[in-house]
Image (tube, rainbow, N blue to C red):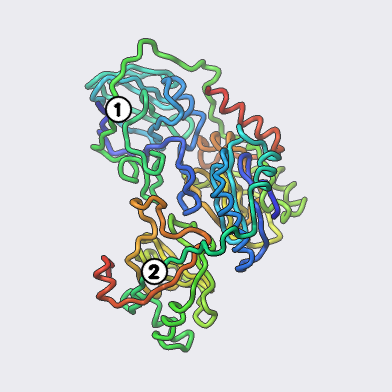
Amino acid sequence: MEFKLASVDSLIIYFGNEISQDVASKVKNAYLSLKKQNCEGIIEIIPSYSSIFITYDIFKYNYDEVKVKLQESISEESSDILNENIVSIDVYYGTDVGLDLEDMSIKTGLSIEEVILIHSQKLYDVYAIGFLPGFAYMASVDKKIAMPRLSSPRKSIPKGSVSIADTQTAVYPQSSPGGWNIIGRTALELFDKNLDSLSPLSVGDKVKFNPISKEEFLSQGGVL
Amino acid sequence: MSLEIINAPIFATVQDKGRFSYTSIGVTNSGVMDEFSYEMANKLLGNNKEANTIEIAFSNVHFKVNAQTTLAITGASCEFFINDVLKTTWQTHNVKAGDIIKVGKILEGTRVYLSVKDGFKIEKEFGSNSTTIKENLGGLDGDKLKKGQVLAFDSYLQAHNTRLKEKFIPKFTNELELRVLLSYQDDNFQQEQIDKFFSSTYTITNEFNRMGCKLSGEAISCDINGIISEGISFGAIQIPSDGQPIILLKDRQTIGGYPKIGSVLSIDCFKLAQAKPKCKITFKPIEIKEAQEKLKEFYLAFN
């Protein structure tokens, strides 16, 4: 754990300098231990791939005091390894919604079915949430279907699009400009004002994509 | 009991202190760009610190009053009329049903705040009325205010009007010195680059909105091109590969991968919020201990 000043009322804690499962699990454990303690005067906690950013009430702690407080509160070790949240996301992987499936099939030399199988077989870790509310950066996509971002981003990617950029995968929670490769679509709301937590995903969760038919997708309220 | 918008404002939004504790799922803090003007309006009106306001970023917004209340205009200096009579800003005014309020031309500064006694009655979204358009959150409908919309309030009549002393009313100039805490990736900038950053004069470009403020001037180079995406503070100064600093403000994205040389002290970001493109910017270092004392003084002054 390395503390670094961020601003007048915030700091950042680094748990490593690489994107890896090992670093991510330290971030996750520290994040969960902090959230569990619900320390007074800690305002924002933003976990990401290798760091946790924190803003705090300067009327409660000065910079040195908050560092001591956080050092005491954070545990990098998992308190409960069984406490693993696996979220299943139903995806319709059709070429009518998976705008880049055919292109990816050509570039990888794999059939479309193989691309879908490889993407949906793996269990992914949520490493960070940002860019848009509920936009979760998940990894790692099998290298066989890893794909760089489009050279020219699309002006509008439809809401619910399941996408790949390099070895990361994500779902667009709302329609937005973007440069990720689109392989399918889900009817699941990734940012839902009616949910207490706002998003079904949080950093540290695991995600499994579950292929469904067009009919199932439509019956779930999916829009083509 | 309400205020009705009777023309089409170019860019006016409902704001308050901001939306907190949802940044972990990518929801930004949002909130008023100029907290000094906002806090002062609430102080003049005797409002609680959470009361919302209308942040007006372009000239000419007209309202019709539908019940009596007390209101105040703070922020950028502007032509302010009640029933076509020019009135003073930074003071409270009683208005009654039928009155027409006009925020006319903005003269100096950029953002005008129109606050009413006890704020507008709008249901909060995730603890705040602050509007973030890209997230479709806050305000009346997650968007900027439009002609014909109605902002409800509780009727009120204040016995005495209060007014801010002239010497406390901010002056808006075309030069601004911003205090900076070296932080984040400052170790990845060579000393000569840091010296260059503090000795150069930058200019505010047209890329200046609620998300951030892009400057132009001496390019600053960083030893690293990008970083692993991480949480971004209010006032953080990103140095993208073109070396031109970007100061991140209230609607900033929550995480990002550009190196950051430091952060502008939030009090100075509030001053920046009133600056215009072409304004000259210089930076001056400040240490964390002094910075926190200054920020505490700032907030305590409104108690």
Tell me the residue at 66%/51% (across/down): B184
A13 is higher (above) or lower (below) than A138: above
> Residue B289 versus residue A88: which sits nearer the camera?
A88
Q: Which residue is mark 1?
A: B153
A83 on left or right of B198: left
Task: Please name the amino acid that badge 2 sits on.
Answer: Ile
For label 1, the SS is loop
Instruction: Name the residue that disc number 2 marks.
Output: A89
Nearer the observer, disc 1 or disc 2? 2
Q: Position of residue B120 (x, y in %)?
A: 33, 30
**Viewer-side residue, B21 vs B70:** B21
Query: Alpha-carbon distance for marks 1 and 2?
Result: 44 Å
Q: Residue at x 46, y 68 (%)?
A: A207
Whether the residues at callouts 1 and 2 have beta carbons within 8 Å, the answer is: no
Q: Give the residue drawn at x 38%, y 56%.
A: A191
Q: Position of residue B70 (x, y in %)?
A: 34, 19
* Position of the N terminus of chain A by quadrant: bottom right
Please rate how many residues cluster around mark 1, counting C-alpha atoms within 10 Å: few if below 14, some from 14 to 19, many from 20.
Answer: many
Residue at 46%, 22% (x, y): give it: B43
Q: Amino acid at mark 1?
A: Phe
Q: Secondary structure at mark 2?
A: strand
